[in-house]
Image (spheres, helix red, strand yellow):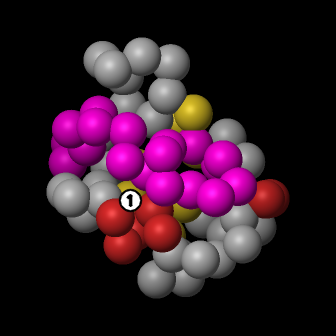
Amino acid sequence: MPKIEIDPELCTKCGTCVSNCPVGIFQQDDDESVPLVVGTDNCILCGMCVDNCPEDAVKHENF
């Protein structure tokens, strides 16, 4: 299970990580909240979350 974190200081709550993850490991309750990492066991190591975050807020130990 990879270590994946979202830096709340950098995150603008845009939801890009949520919409780009093909296996849905991120969950965002509303537009005012930082997304939560809820399913790291399902991560397929594609890097879409890291590559698409416009603020470089997603930290993934494999990338």
14 part of magenta stretch: yes
Residue 59 seen from this side? no
Report the predominant secondary structure element of the magenta stretch: loop
Left or right: 13 with respect to 2?
Answer: left
Whether residue 11 is visible: yes
The image shows residue 47, relative to residue 7, as above or below, that is below
Q: Nearer the viewer, residue 1 or 52?
A: 52
Residue 31 placement (x, y as % from top left): 33, 20
- For the N terminus, which image quadrant? bottom right
Q: Give the image location of residue 37, x and y in percent.
A: 58, 44
Q: Residue at x 71, y 64 (%)?
A: 43
Q: Is residue 14 left or right of residue 63?
A: left
Say which residue appears at 64% left-offset and 77% top-offset: 45
Q: Which residues are magenta?
A: 9-26
Crowding at mark 1 (Cα within 10 Å: few <14, some 14-19, many 20+): many
Residue 51's image quarter?
A: bottom left
Q: Which residue is mark 1?
A: 58
Which sits in the foreground, 22 or 1?
A: 22
Q: Is residue 29 magenta?
A: no
Q: Is residue 47 left or right of residue 46?
A: left
* Amino acid residing under circle 1: Val
